Image (cartoon, rainbow, N blue to C red):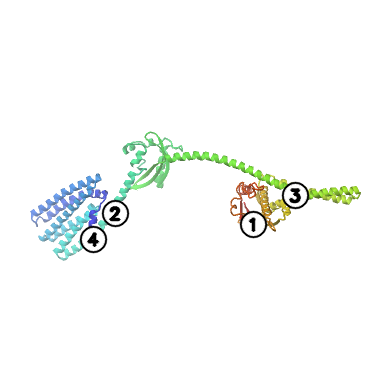
Amino acid sequence: MLRQLWNEKYSFELIKLLAETLSLGIIIVNIVAPLVIVYLLQDFIENTVLIIWVSVHIFFFVVRLLINRQLIKHIKNKSKKVYAYLKRMYLVIFISTLLYGYIIWISILHNVPDTHIFLIATIISGLAAGSLYTLGAVFIAYIIYMVPNFLFLISAMVYHGGDIFQLYALTMFTMMGVFLIAGYKHYRAIRNTTSLDSNFKILYENSTDGIVIFQENKFVSLNKSMYKLFKYESEKAFLSVSLRKISPKYQPDGQPSVKKMVKMIEYTFKEGYATFEWLHTDKNAKEFWCEIVLTKICIDDTDLIYGVWRDISDRKELEFMTLSLNSNLEQRVKEEVALNREKDEQMLHQSRLAQMGEMISMIAHQWRQPLSAIASAGALINLKAQLGKLDKEMALEISQNIANYTQHLSATIDDFRNFFKQDKHKEATSYTYLVNSVLNIIRISLQNKNIQIKEELECKDSFMTYSNELKQVIINLVKNAQDILVDHKITNPYIKLKSYTSDGKYILEVSDNGGGISPDVIDEIFDPHFSTKLNKDGTGLGLYMSRTIVEEHCGGKLSCYNTQEGACFKLELPSA
């Protein structure tokens, strides 16, 4: 362990601290204390011995001063020669302990009075204890001086004998252990402190950000990056410039730069922290942006501000470019949205035309029976009249039938007209009304194809929506189910319309027993122009426009999934 301590490469900061505190210690150890001891021993020991002993101390005083000067020199130059001179200092320190060990032993061997021996012992132990503050920065130097001094002192006290001296020796031994532990803790504290100071200094000097210390609204210290940021040659040149010259008169928000900076400093002193962006001007009057972080600190009971300046000119330029691009992009998005809306309207119109053709076909089916009945009634009237058998009662009966058939035709026309009337405003309606309106038009077509209609309309609640648009959705879902059932030639085909409420939503399900939709395409059925009937007459717009109506116009949701028997389309509308 001693070898490790001997060869340890102490930091330049610790060695510098040793060299700075050592001068006073050298004077006390090699000049003041030896003279006091000589004064105490002049009547008991030969003067020649004392003169030689003091002369050796004075010689080593000069040697230590020279070595100390070399330490300071090589520390400034960051030279590794400092470690060679440090070991020479160790040797001189150890010789000093030998000199004090010699004098205490000489005193005992010459039967110097006990009071004088106690005084000399007190001086030596005091020097050993006090070395903590002069040598403590380099722990091995402290050990080399403190431990031998105590060991020479303890051994001399034990040799002298006597209870008092034995007790004194025991006390010194205990104190040596205490000072050894205290010295190590003191060394670690100094080492950690200097390490932090050194690291902070490295960060301070080598930081790419500008760092400053504020006091009373002015810079008192700054690093190289700070004055380079403003294109000045030195710290002194930058500090000589007025703060008014490093900012434009007004900041971009219109506030005067000086007043705003004073406000930010006052805010920092009050809150302890502030961060903001600032427009500066450099030595060449060129403007640039900085991000500034101010932090309140306290040093020696004085409140200061620690500031960090970071050049963000590139970032601000990118922000301005981004804003410009976003503005252009926003305009393009609006144009594309308008174009897409126009395309959607065209596709919706195309879908309506396709549905209108299907509706006309269904109306034609519904008109055949009443038109045939009217034609038959007309033929019957003509025949009875020719035979002279058209009496009053029969004429009234046949005319009433004709009136009923005509009323049925008129109602069918009204259903057709209302179905395609464009909604301008939302109106109160219900699933029961919507489903019945659709079935009034399409029921005969379904019956002609032997398709059973199952109605489970449990939701009777009224809600606000665009009813005619939802009718188009429902009829489209029912017609798709009809086509699947017919194409697949399903035995006992049916279409179920079921309504109910769940989690505050109004739900309508349109399902069938047509075998369902292939898993390969079920995720694509709502895409525009996708159709499983392209080889026939499908446009691929029905389901796409149905989802557009439900989700974009009515604020609901339209989804699809397969059941065990077929496909189920689920229409959900919010309650409010």
Q: Name the secondary structure under disc 2.
A: helix
Q: Residue furthest right?
A: 388
- The residue pinned by badge 2 equals 189
Foreground residue, 290 or 543? 543
Give the Cα separation between the discs numbered 3 and 2: 103 Å
Structural crowding at the residue carrying mark 2, measured as other residues with C-alpha within 10 Å and reported as few (<14), some (14–19) or many (≥20): few
Q: Mark 2: which amino acid?
A: Ala
Determine if residue 422 is in view.
Answer: no
- The residue pinned by badge 1 equals 515
Determine if residue 322 is in view.
Answer: yes
Between disc 3 and disc 2, whose residue precedes? 2
- Where residue 388 appears, as percent x and y from the top left, is 91, 49
Q: Name the secondary structure under disc 4.
A: helix
Front disc: 3 or 2: 3
Give the Cα separation between the discs numbered 1 and 2: 83 Å
Front disc: 1 or 2: 1
- The residue pinned by badge 3 equals 365
Between disc 1 and disc 2, whose residue precedes? 2
Q: Quadrant of the N terminus?
A: bottom left
- The residue pinned by badge 4 equals 177
Between disc 4 and disc 3, whose residue precedes? 4
